[in-house]
Each structure stands twice: as structure tokens, then as C-alpha cells.
């Protein structure tokens, strides 16, 4: 299995220095998220952070986790992805998500679309991006996008080694429609908890293991050999002393499946490795308590 670690936004740590440290620890990949903010956490621009990571490393993969389709044009996303593939010497994975945080979109003066509209817009964007990454060209007339990038107006930096396109999805319709369009699907285990426009821990506590397994089966039913990843929020203790923040997060998730990824690092690592039994080959980890990934690394890598 591969384990990717997400940049700890809001800590003030330089993304390049952080990525170099994670490469030295042996992580398979590092991630940059695409937000203005989540709660009190402020984020650097996703492509600036990812480029810093690429320039500071030589082996580990770099990915966007996930670029927000409500923020940017699919043409701009494809252009930036091609440039990052070149800057990283072929180590970039182009991750694009539908977008879920209402307050960011409304702060920009935009209307936050309902769930079905976000999925429809996302599916169209993935079609456009897929064509642009492969050829630098796309003519598309849909309900949400009308694109004409063709002839003399084509994107630069297209090669025979385009960055793999990754979609993040968690609902039946999204999984069904995005799977044929991409190179990897990342199951968003907490998808139901973000459909309300923010991260709702009460809903997150109701996610079950069967739900995750069913989503893996949905992907496999469409493409049996599709690489599948999963997004996991985690928090672990730094030592024998229990951390109230970790205990509080675990208690908030109750007996829900996602509570397995909070607590003792060895037990969390065991739960993460068990994801491989479902057919998941990559886990992307976002730490909710600083230092969690450093504690997990000896058990995972």
C-alpha cells in the first residue's frame, strides 16, 4: 500500500521544507489541499504549495488533494497540472474534486450550487481535463462549460507522460459517472458529512465500514482494475500520555467506522493496513492533531 500525507496548513511550516522532511521519512506521496480556509485554518494557494513541494523533493509523488472545481476553470487546472508534471519530472498526480465548502464560495461572491449541480459540473470538468491532459486540446459544449481549446489555441507541455487524473467521490452517482473518466478514484469516506456545505462530525460518526466497502464495489463494477484510494482524517497519541484532543475527536465519532483512525498509533496503523483487504491501494492522511503523521510513520512505512 501507498501512504500519502497532507500538508498541515495553518502551521506556518514551509511546504517545500515539510515535503523534503516527509520524503526523508519514507512517505510515498505528499499532498496540497485547495482551500482558502477551513474554520480557523488558512491555506496557501494549492499550486504554489505543490510546486514548492516538487522543487524540494526528488522521489516522492506530489498530488493536489483536491483542487476545488468550484474555484477554477478546468482549462486552468489542466494547464497548471501539465506544468507541475514537468516541474516535478513526472511525479505529479492531478487530483480534482467537486468542491464542498459553502462559506468559501459565498465569500468569493459566487452561488454555492446544490449537490446534483456540483456533481454534473464536476463530471463535465473531468471530461474536459482528461482531453486536455492527453492532447492539449478540447472542444466541449455542455450544460456548465463551453470550451474551445483547439487548433493553434492548444495547451503547452503536453507529453506522452501526462499526469494521472484522480477524482474524489463518495456518492453512488458521482462514483458511477467519474470512474470511466479518470486514472484513479479516491473514495471520500466522509462525503455524506460534507454535503451540507461544511464538515459535520455528527454525520461523519455514522459512516460505516459496509458503506466504504460498497463504494469500492461500485467502482470495481465499472472498472475491475481501477486503482482506488481513500481519504482519511486521523489523530493519534504522541506517547503513553493520552492527548485530550485525540480522545475528544475519537469520542465525537463514537462507534462509527472512522473512529478507528483516531487513538493509539499502532492500532490506527493496523486499521489503515486493513483497508488493503478491501482493495484500496493508497491512503491519503490528513492529521487533525499536529504530530500524528510523525507518530504513524514508523508503523506504516
Image: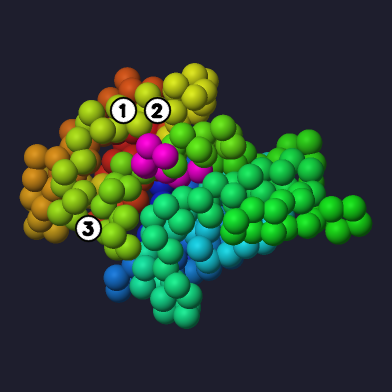
Q: Is residue 96 left or right of residue 229?
A: right
Q: Residue at x 46, y 34 (%)?
A: 176
Q: Which mark is residue 200?
A: 3
Examine the image and state in which quarter residue 240 appears.
Answer: top left
Q: Is residue 62 visible?
A: no
In front of the other: 196 or 299: 196
Q: CA distance from mark 2 to mark 3?
A: 24 Å
Q: Secondary structure at mark 1?
A: helix
Quadrant in the picture for the N terminus: top left
Of residues 79 and 83, the one nearer the viewer is 79
Q: Residue at x 51, y 51 (%)?
A: 120
**10 Å crowding of disc 2: few (<14), some (14-19), many (20+):** some
Rendered location of residue 105, percent (x, y) = 44, 71
**Disc 1/disc 3 C-alpha distance (Å):** 22 Å
Q: 259 above or below 111?
A: above
Which labelled disc corresponds to residue 214? Answer: 1
Q: CA distance from mark 1 to mark 2?
A: 6 Å
* Residue in the foreground of this view, choosing between 125 and 288: 125
Which residue occupies the foreground of this view, 160 or 268? 160
Other residues around mark 3 within 10 Å, as few (<14) / some (14–19) / many (≥20): some
Above or below residue 35? Residue 96 is: above
Q: What's drawn in magenta, residue-wise?
A: 167-173
Amino acid at each position: 500500500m501507498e501512504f500519502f500525507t497532507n500538508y498541515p496548513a495553518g502551521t506556518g511550516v514551509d511546504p517545500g521544507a515539510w515535503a523534503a522532511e516527509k520524503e526523508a521519512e519514507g512517505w510515498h506521496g505528499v499532498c496540497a489541499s485547495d482551500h482558502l480556509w477551513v474554520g480557523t485554518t488558512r491555506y496557501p494557494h494549492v499550486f504554489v504549495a505543490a510546486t514548492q513541494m516538487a522543487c524540494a523533493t526528488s522521489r516522492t509523488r506530489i498530488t493536489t488533494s483536491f483542487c476545488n472545481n468550484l474555484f477554477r476553470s478546468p482549462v486552468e487546472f489542466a494547464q497548471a497540472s501539465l506544468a507541475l508534471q514537468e516541474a516535478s519530472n513526472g511525479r505529479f498526480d492531478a487530483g480534482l474534486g467537486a468542491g464542498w465548502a459553502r462559506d468559501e464560495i459565498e465569500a468569493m461572491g459566487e452561488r454555492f450550487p446544490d449537490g446534483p449541480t456540483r456533481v454534473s459540473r464536476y463530471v463535465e470538468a473531468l471530461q474536459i481535463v482528461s482531453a486536455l491532459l492527453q492532447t492539449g486540446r478540447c472542444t466541449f459544449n455542455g450544460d456548465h462549460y463551453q470550451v474551445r481549446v483547439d487548433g493553434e489555441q492548444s495547451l503547452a507541455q503536453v507529453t506522452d507522460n501526462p499526469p494521472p487524473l484522480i477524482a474524489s467521490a463518495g456518492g453512488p452517482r458521482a462514483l458511477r459517472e467519474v470512474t470511466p473518466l479518470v486514472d484513479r478514484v479516491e473514495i471520500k469516506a466522509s462525503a455524506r458529512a460534507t454535503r451540507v456545505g461544511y464538515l459535520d462530525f455528527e454525520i461523519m460518526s455514522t459512516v460505516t465500514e459496509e458503506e466504504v466497502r460498497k463504494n469500492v464495489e461500485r467502482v470495481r463494477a465499472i472498472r475491475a482494475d481501477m486503482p482506488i484510494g481513500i481519504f482519511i482524517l486521523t489523530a493519534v497519541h504522541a506517547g503513553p500520555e493520552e492527548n485530550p484532543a485525540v480522545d475528544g475527536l475519537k469520542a465525537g465519532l463514537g462507534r462509527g467506522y472512522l473512529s478507528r483512525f483516531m487513538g493509539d498509533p499502532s492500532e490506527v496503523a493496523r486499521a489503515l493496513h486493513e483497508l488493503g483487504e478491501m482493495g484500496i491501494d493508497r491512503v491519503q492522511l490528513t492529521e487533525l492533531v499536529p504530530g500524528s503523521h510523525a507518530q504513524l510513520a514508523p508503523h506504516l512505512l
